[in-house]
Amino acid sequence: MNHNLYEPPQADLETRSMRPRQPGSLVKALLTGTGIEIVGTLLVALGVGVVYALLLRPDGVSAEEAAKAFDPLSPIGLIGGALGLLVSVFAGYACAAIANRDDYKPSYAMAAISLGLGLLMDAGQSSPLTLLLLSALTVGAVLLGSWLHLRDPKSD
């Protein structure tokens, strides 16, 4: 027993941190990761669109020229795509962290859900080659986020 009345009590914190985390819910991981992916991507698109519209407003650009600028392969589209990929990396990390598994299965499932929803939201607006490129980048970003979690020694 500690005889100093002014010293705080000591706790054995090492035993709790040494205990491995149990696997989490796959449903919760998939819903959280997909939610981050969809909401984050929509917020990025909205933010990039608003900023770009504010930049174009003083120049008096026509609606057709402004619509061309939102092509995924235009400069503003590439900036939005890069920010969207960062959201996908974070979503993959969150999915892997919540699932807490030693493999990529939750991230593959989340990437498949994101691709399916992305195809539904695209509704034939993009060319097949563009869709293939964006889909491959999305899957790569989600798996990168999962890899970042799996390689982190503090995540166990």
Image (tube, helix red, strand yellow):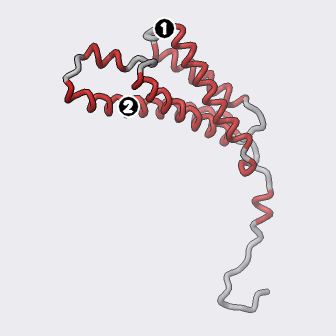
Image-based side of 50 in relation to 79, left or right: left
| Image quarter of residue 53 | top left
| Amino acid at pointer 2 | Val
**Percent coordinates x, y for residue 140 in the rendering:** 63, 26
| Image quarter of residue 93 | top right
Q: Is the residue 146 above or below the residue 18 in the image?
A: above
**Residue where numbered disc 1 is placed:** 127
**Percent coordinates x, y for residue 44 in the rendering:** 43, 33
Image point (64%, 36%), residue name: 145
| Image quarter of residue 107 | top right
**Percent coordinates x, y for residue 61 in the rendering:** 23, 20
Q: Secondary structure at mark 2?
A: helix
* Distance (Cα) linking label 2 and label 1: 22 Å
Image-based side of 57 in relation to 110, left or right: left
Q: Quadrant of the N terminus?
A: bottom right
Image-based side of 45 in relation to 96, left or right: left
Q: Residues within 10 Å of mark 1 (few under 14, many from 20)?
A: few
Q: Earlier in the sequence, mark 2 or mark 1?
A: 2
**Residue where numbered disc 2 is placed:** 48
**Percent coordinates x, y for residue 65 in the rendering:** 29, 16
